[in-house]
Image (cartoon, grey):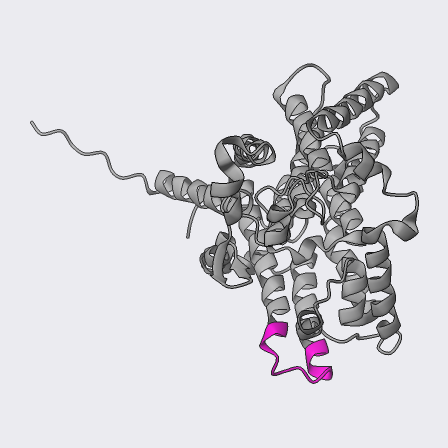
Amino acid sequence: MQKKRKPMNLSKIWQKLDLLAMYIVFLSLVIFPFVRLREGLYAGIDDFLAPFIFLFTIKYLKDYIRHKYVWFLLIFSAYIMFTIAINGRLWSIRDYFEIYKMFKFLFFVLFAYIIFDKYKKAFDIVISISFVLLLVMNLAHYFNVWGYNYYIEPYYATTEIHLSTFGLDSLGNPAVRRMIGTLGNPNDNAILFLFYFTYFLSKTVTFGINRNLLFMYLSFLCVVLTQSRTGFIAGLTVYIIWSIMTKQSIKISFINIIFFIATFFIAFTFSPLSLDYYANTYPHLAKNNSVMGRLEMWEHLLRMIKHKPIFGYGPNKDYFYDNGLYPESEYVLYMWRYGITGLLLYSAWIFLPVYKQVKKLRNNTFFLLFAIVIGLNAITNCPLSSPKINALFALAVGYFFATIKPEGLKANDGTHT
């Protein structure tokens, strides 16, 4: 007799498709290279995936529309539209990208919440796998293994100067090596590894030798190799905050700090000029081109803010493109674009998810620590202006909501309708 075929289990098929989608989305942010559209214009794979994420999440929107963070993002988007209108820039196509960015962020948050609410361990799995891949790729780039910087890194280094001057100063002499990685520049790469650092730090519940502890130290080492001063300070800051929140013993804190210092000197052996680079951060500020460039830019933008302090100039991306300017601080950028209101909205964008969640934060420190990383980096950089960091932060928000189940977000039973 012919054996009866077992009926196809649609639920298991959907589960596999859900997980596959999550893996592809996450890897598109941290591993996959940029796609060059034309000279100077690049897009991430996540931008091509955004319409599919929209279709995946739109049917769930009614379940989450009551949540205050969803409403906040919608109000923020409407406010951006308002500033475009009052500044007479309704015909500027570039400005609407900022509204697209907010909606993309919203749907990435919902996508992460839906997936990680159903599959609790999926986040840990994709974090661990992607970290190992990133570690191998970044070290291959740093030491130029088998011509990595000639054959592979150009697909990631969207600004040619970062790669052409890797390990060299403006005169072509040996200088500090700043690890560019998969995000195209050292500062974004530092934030990426701080994402991993804060996650593995939040999972380090005991000091015994384990995967999370090892990955935490390795991720901090990679932060140091990017030579990002702000990233280095942010890493130490979140560690101190985590130690206080989790009431770590003085002994454990001391041992960890010793290990952090050790990673710093390991990085120094890789690139002896690293110590000079960090030492140049504070002394002789008037001779520090990086610091002086930022101060001059902030002074320029703050003078302009005085003329439009409430609603700002709108996104007005043309002003920065046409004048070859980079704002150097996302707080200053959002105040210039949207006035004092914009500065408050930007701060809420980062920290609103933890509002009234103090009791749950001790056991869910990851998101708070990463939000602090974003907040600190925004002082001297523009982290959420990076499409990949922006989307990564959205996934972190969604994961946080999935772990605490805030009021207004409906629990998912794992079925599809």
Q: Which residue range is magenta in the image?
A: 82-95
Residue ID at (9%, 29%): 2
Above or below residue 45? Residue 102 is below
Residue ID at (80%, 32%): 275
- The x, y position of residue 378, in whole percent, is 77, 53
Residue 284 shown left or right of residue 257 in the figure: right
- Per the image, is 93 magenta? yes
Which of the pair 300/174 is nearer the observer?
A: 174
Which of the pair 13/261 is nearer the observer?
A: 261
Which of the pair 300/207 is nearer the observer?
A: 300
Residue ID at (80%, 25%): 261
- Per the image, is 39 magenta? no
Report whether residue 344 is seen: yes
Residue 104 shown left or right of residue 76 in the figure: left
Which quarter of the picture shows residue 167?
A: top right
Above or below residue 227? Residue 185 is below
- What is the count of numbered marks? 0
- The x, y position of residue 285, in whole percent, is 91, 49
- The x, y position of residue 345, in whole percent, is 77, 62
Residue ID at (75%, 41%): 231
Q: Residue placed farthest to the top in the image?
A: 208
Which of the pair 226/285 is nearer the observer?
A: 285
